[in-house]
Structure formats: structure tokens, C-alpha cells
């Protein structure tokens, strides 16, 4: 029974990663009105999360810094944890504690500069 409970947690981690991806991009997870290849947000954006240079392609424009049109300092840290949450195998996904730690770090970096 413990295996099923653990599997549920890691399924929830994946779902939470999808929600974080929607926040990061400002897009719904599925939108048939987007161009071909971008209709499924997870399939399109997940490969782009691994490299900071791609962040501008997927980041919600409302999150960009007003002064220099750059992503907030914690945005790439958030992208990295989203990428880990969306790993296809459960054992590669972070724990909720790890996610919380990253979210706190993102907040600290963005607010304390």
C-alpha cells in the first residue's frame, strides 16, 4: 500500500509542475488555437526549460522586468524545478520539500535584490 501512496505523491508533483509551467508561461496547458507544435504546453515547453537562453521564448511577458525587459532573477531557478517536476519517471521528480526550497529561493532572489 505504501507504494501506491508514494506513486500518488509523485503524480501530484507532476500536476504541480504543470501548474507552475502555466504560471511561468502565462499559457493554458492545452490550447488548440495555438500554432502546430505548441498546442500541448508540456510537450512544447519542457525541452526549453533546461537552458536559460530559451527562457525568453516561453516566459510570460508580464513577468519581464519593466526596466530592461529581462526575466526576473529567480525565473530560471523556477524553470529548472518545473523541468524536474515534469520528468516522465516518478523517481526523477523532486520531493515537495525540494520544490518548496526552490520556491523560497526564487522569492528571496527576486525580492531581496
Image (tube, rainbow, N blue to C red):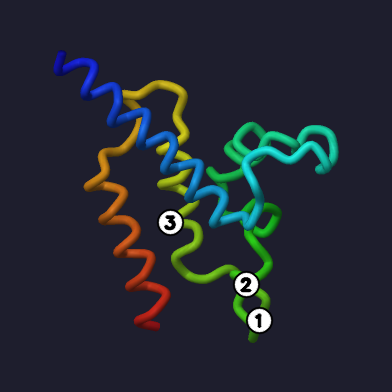
Secondary element at image label 2: loop
Q: Which residue occupies the extreme bottom position in the image?
A: 67
- Residue 68's label in the rendered image is 1
Q: Residue drawn at (85%, 40%), measured in percent from left and top?
A: 35
Secondary element at image label 3: helix
Q: Compared to 65, does 71 lie above or below?
A: above
User: Callout 1 environment at 10 Å: few (<14), some (14 to 19), or many (20+)?
Assistant: few
**Residue 52 spot, x, y in % from top left:** 56, 54
- Residue 77's label in the rendered image is 3
- Residue 22's label in the rendered image is none
Q: Quadrant location of the N terminus?
A: top left
The residue identified by callout 2 is 64
Q: Residue drawn at (30%, 64%), measured in percent from left and top?
A: 104
**Residue 97 spot, x, y in % from top left:** 22, 47
**Residue 50 spot, x, y in % from top left:** 53, 43
Mark 3 to mark 2: distance in Å?
Answer: 15 Å
Mark 1 to mark 2: distance in Å?
Answer: 8 Å
Q: Compared to 68, does 82 lie above or below?
A: above
Nearer-the-camera pick, 39 or 45: 39
Disc 3 or 1, which lies upstream in sequence?
1
Q: Nearer the viewer, mark 3 or mark 2?
A: 2
**Residue 87 spot, x, y in % from top left:** 45, 29
Nearer-the-camera pick, 30 or 50: 30
User: Callout 2 environment at 10 Å: few (<14), some (14 to 19), or many (20+)?
Assistant: some
User: Callout 3 environment at 10 Å: few (<14), some (14 to 19), or many (20+)?
Assistant: some
Amino acid at each position: 500500500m505504501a507504494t501506491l501512496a508514494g506513486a500518488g505523491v509523485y503524480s501530484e508533483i507532476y500536476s504541480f509542475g504543470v501548474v507552475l509551467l502555466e504560471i511561468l508561461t502565462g499559457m493554458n496547458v492545452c490550447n488548440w488555437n495555438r500554432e502546430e507544435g505548441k498546442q500541448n504546453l508540456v510537450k512544447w515547453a519542457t525541452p526549453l526549460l533546461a537552458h536559460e537562453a530559451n527562457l525568453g521564448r516561453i516566459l510570460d511577458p508580464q513577468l519581464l522586468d519593466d526596466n530592461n525587459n529581462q526575466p526576473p532573477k529567480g525565473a530560471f531557478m523556477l524553470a529548472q524545478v518545473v523541468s524536474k517536476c515534469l520528468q516522465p519517471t516518478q523517481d526523477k521528480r523532486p520531493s515537495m520539500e525540494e520544490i518548496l526550497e526552490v520556491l523560497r529561493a526564487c522569492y528571496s532572489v527576486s525580492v531581496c535584490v
